[in-house]
Amino acid sequence: MGIRSAKDAIREARQKAGLTQENLSEGVCSMQSLSRIETGTAGISPATFQALMERAGAPCERFPVFASRDDFDCFYALKHARFYLDAWQLTPAWKELQKLEGKNWADNRLYYQEWLLLHCRLQSRSYCCTHSQNYELLLKALHITRPSIDLSNFHQLILSQNELQLLIALSHEAFYLGQYENCLQICIQVKDYLSGCHFTTLEIDHMQAESAIVYTKYLLMAKNYDDALNTADTHRHKMAINADTASLFELTFLTGLCYYYKDDLNSANLHIKAAFYSAHAVDCCYATICRDFLRTNTDFPITDYMENLPDIPLKTYPVKSYPDTLCLSDGVYNIDSTDAYTLGKLIQELRLEQHVSQQVLCQGLCSKSKLSKIENGTLQPNIALAEALLQRLGVSERIFTFWGNEKEAKLYELKFKLIHHQIMKKETRKNLLCEMEHLLDDNDILYRQIYLAFKSLQSDSINDKITGLFNALHITLPNFDIHQIHRYRLSWEELSLLNNIAHEYRCTGESYLSTLYFLQILSYVKTTKPDILLQAIFLPNTNQMYCHSLYVLKLHHEVINLANQIDLSIMNFNINLFGGYLFCYSQSLGECANWKDAILTATQACAFSDLMELYKNTDILHKYFLTDFSINLKY
């Protein structure tokens, strides 16, 4: 079964939730527009689709249809802006937000609402904003879909994620404006709402963490240190487990402050320094904010090493006067519009722009005839095929919203757990693989590839792992030749398989193949230039694994040279892997007697490990430096 239509998904979700068209459409679109959507006479922008599905309490797993190319470009730019903001990379986020303004938000007020939210988040994270101005812009954004909202009593409304995030941001600005009662009322209502809402666990955890930052600041202001510590540390721990770094710097620093005010200086020292050095390592201005706060507001013992690191400069981003929304549409369009931008049209345009033939793109995935039908809109691919085609064109499928059948949803869920829940018992992983195997049939070649990859990595034999990984790769690329990598277009799964093959070769009699494979992967990335959202999913793994392999082979000068050959900024988007990279890199610097850089990178590696609660790694690195180099890492 292919991707389902929006009309069926929305109508079923609304009826299941027991909502009328009037209830569901309120603030999002007109009731007449919703009626046209549900009867299939009108199309719908992804932003509007998501808002309606969230209102109905239904998961919107994946659904890519756009009103026009501008609609897609704005949708994509918003995803980029969020991605950069979550990693505290503010200047790239600002550039992405500028793109939307230049396209008039694709004439879509829901894109404009999200744009205002992200613009205000950028201002807040720059620490150069005017809080009263930010508050007014956030309120303006909220009123786009909730013009009559009462901030003291909104818990009974059906809210979208953007609306909730706007409320959390408003509570933050209210705190800085000294509107403590307003701040507290919003925090309490958001907490109650999220405790019983319909979003995914990860989405709820993310929003709860954002709200916990505000509530912790309120409790610290009230000198309620016990509750402040419980709030900050609980959500800090969740973010570390989820590897969600968007709120992790702030929650870790606030946890350290709570310990400081409770006179637990050892715990304060661990958390405050983990936040400071980690933020500094990714060139995040929050490091400057942390140190300035400690200097001005506390007697925290700032070490000479901490004091002497350079500031990460704060940068001001202009605030303009922004238009009304009366001239913008609700994202509903004529289903027969010649501008309608389908998934097939996107795939075709990307393929032609990149000068990729149909044969190269669909190799091992589907026939040229099937790809032609997808591109001309006469056939919808299943979810796995849609994802693989997009990935081979350098686009992360995770930005889209697909909507498939029950089996596809279950396979997607199993894949997500196997990829993202790295810390799980071997037996649990085995059970998930068995569950996936039972769902697979002969047509599920892409999920079978994923299944074989994970199954291979469970083996205790390196040779069996390599053989199993190659068997998985050959499902879609039966005659793959690493020396001819530029002849191919590779999906995320195929690149992941090559990463793991390269990593496993390091401990064999053919260890030179490890270097060969990693160099070819890096060359492929340099030539094909995948989008940053796709690079961030696999390239930090490549860099970390390559560094580790060179270190294991005692090629310390090569480890150091690697840092000059790759763009290390990609590591900012996965600080867990960045910590692993620096763990090996710092020791290679020590082996080459580059003491100053060795101490700095070891300090950063320890900070990342403490931030992610990998405390054993910190202890091991301390021991290595003391034993091998007679250096006691005191920072």
Image: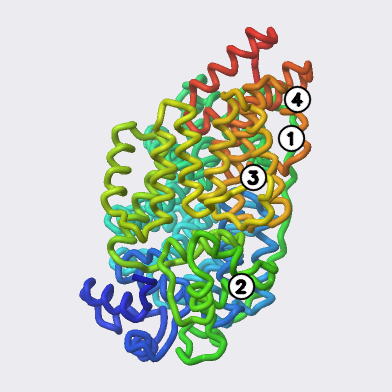
Quarter of the image containing the N terminus? bottom left
Looking at the image, tell me whether mark 3 or mark 4 is earlier in sequence order: 3
Percent position of residue 576, x then y: 54, 36
Local SS, label 3: helix
Instruction: Determine which residue is flagged by label 1.
Output: 563
**Label 2 vs label 4, nearer the camera:** 2
* Separation of residues labelled 3 and 4 (CA atoms): 35 Å
- 322 relative position to 46: left or right: right
**Label 1 vs label 2, nearer the camera:** 1
Q: Quadrant of residue 327?
A: bottom right
* Amino acid tagged 3: Ile
Q: How is the protein colored in the picture?
A: rainbow
Looking at the image, tell me whether mark 1 or mark 2 is earlier in sequence order: 2
Q: Residue at x 47, y 72 (%)?
A: 64
* Separation of residues labelled 1 and 3 (CA atoms): 23 Å
Looking at the image, tell me whether mark 2 or mark 3 is earlier in sequence order: 2
Instruction: Determine which residue is flagged by label 3.
Output: 482
- 60 relative position to 517: left or right: left
450 w.r.t. 35: above or below: above
Percent position of residue 185, x then y: 37, 57
Label disc, if present, on residue 597 of the rendered structure? 4
* Separation of residues labelled 2 and 4 (CA atoms): 42 Å
- 87 relative position to 335: left or right: right
Label 4: how many Cα within 10 Å (few below 14, some 14–19, many 20+): some
Does residue 41 show up? yes
- 272 relative position to 635: left or right: left
**Which residue is most to the front?**
479
* Amino acid tagged 4: Asp
